[in-house]
């Protein structure tokens, strides 16, 4: 989970240069202090994330995802450039948008580094979003099982939660062996079961939080959504906030998103 006072409250309201500096600093820490400057094409790349409204915490989670895969391949041989993380950042952003219901993304118009869209083009906001191919169901289950193993190995969860993780991992392992062949109603039933498992894990994770942590997560969710709130109804914002809180609870507990969207 992305944490610390430098990232808390940054949200989507950072100007582009500040956003790029925060990403540069985070990448430096992930690279064990080796500084890789975000300049030239790399600056353009990260600036585009800011323009799309990618929350800083979401971008950092995408970077984390790349590093998780990189470490899994064995000892690192060279520092990671931000360009290598692009696909993972955009994948995590897509997941965040689907979860929160934010399917149209607008830049933060308080940022002087970003130009306003053409208000005469009503389709421009809808065209901002780039549709990315989601992973297959078997690949999704594989990733979930890896994350569950990491969560169990982390040792931060209580014994009761470990029992739940063991049961879920066993069930998902069986599902993974069948997932390639399921179609129609059987596939829908499996997707429904994944959603139920996801909710069960989240409810258990939420129940473990103390009041101070709950409040901190709520504030962070508000910051993530701050760049989008003005264009949302109260009902839509409430749904998006709950989804953002769910994501942050997952990050705090080291849990994957089991539901398959």
Image (cartoon, grey):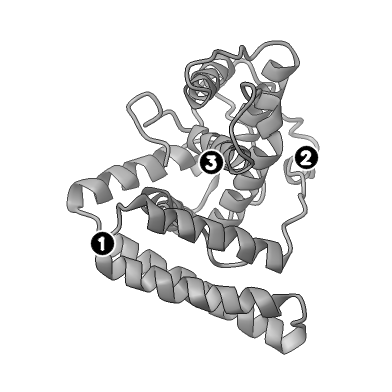
Rendered residue at 25%/47% (across/down):
213
From the viewer's perspective, is the residue at label 1 or at label 3 nearer? 1
Lower sequence index among marks 2 and 3: 2
Give the residue at the far front of this rendering. Answer: 75
Residue 116 appears in the picture as rendered: no
Quarter of the figure with the N terminus: top left
* Left or right, 92 with reference to 202: right
In terms of depth relative to the viewer, which is nearer, 54 or 144?
144
In terms of depth relative to the viewer, which is nearer, 68 or 116?
68
Identify residue for label 2: 124
In terms of depth relative to the viewer, which is nearer, 186 or 231?
186
Q: In x, y percent, where is residue 69?
A: 62, 43
Lower sequence index among marks 1 and 3: 1
Rendered residue at 65%/51% (across/down):
103
Identify residue for label 1: 158
Q: Secondary structure at mark 3?
A: loop
Quarter where residue 140 is shown:
bottom right
Q: Residues within 10 Å of mark 1 (few under 14, many from 20)?
A: few
> Is residue 81 shown above or below 131?
above
Alpha carbon distance from label 2 to label 1? 48 Å
Q: Secondary structure at mark 1?
A: loop
Residue 228: numbered disc: 3
Quarter of the figure with the C terminus: bottom right
* Left or right, 187 with reference to 143: right
Q: Could you tell me if the residues under marks 2 and 1 are in contact, i.e. CB atoms within 8 Å?
A: no
Lower sequence index among marks 2 and 1: 2
> Is residue 5 shown above or below 170?
above
* Left or right, 67 with reference to 168: right
Quarter where residue 82 is shown:
top right
Alpha carbon distance from label 2 to label 3? 16 Å
């Amino acid at each position: 989970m992305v944490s610390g006072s430098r990232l808390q409250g940054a949200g989507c309201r950072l100007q582009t240069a500040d956003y790029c500096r925060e990403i540069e600093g985070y990448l430096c820490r992930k690279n064990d202090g080796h500084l890789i400057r975000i300049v030239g094409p790399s600056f353009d790349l990260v600036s585009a994330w800011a323009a799309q409204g990618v929350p800083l915490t979401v971008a950092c989670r995408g970077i984390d995802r790349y590093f998780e895969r990189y470490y899994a391949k064995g000892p690192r041989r060279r520092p990671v450039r931000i360009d290598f993380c692009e696909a993972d950042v955009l994948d995590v952003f897509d997941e965040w948008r689907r979860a929160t219901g934010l399917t149209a993304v607008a830049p933060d118009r308080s940022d002087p580094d970003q130009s306003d869209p053409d208000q005469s083009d009503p389709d421009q906001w809808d065209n901002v979003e780039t549709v990315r191919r989601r992973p297959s169901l078997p690949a999704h289950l594989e990733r979930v099982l890896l994350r569950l193993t990491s969560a169990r190995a982390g040792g931060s969860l209580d014994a009761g939660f470990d029992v739940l993780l063991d049961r879920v991992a066993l069930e998902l392992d069986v599902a993974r062996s069948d997932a390639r062949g399921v179609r129609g109603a059987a596939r829908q039933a499996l997707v429904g079961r994944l959603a139920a498992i996801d909710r069960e894990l989240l409810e258990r994770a939420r129940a473990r939080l103390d009041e101070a942590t709950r409040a901190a997560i709520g504030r962070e969710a508000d910051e993530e959504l701050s760049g989008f709130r003005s264009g949302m109804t109260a009902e839509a914002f409430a749904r998006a906030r709950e989804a953002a809180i769910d994501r942050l609870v997952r990050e705090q507990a080291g849990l994957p998103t089991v539901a398959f969207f």
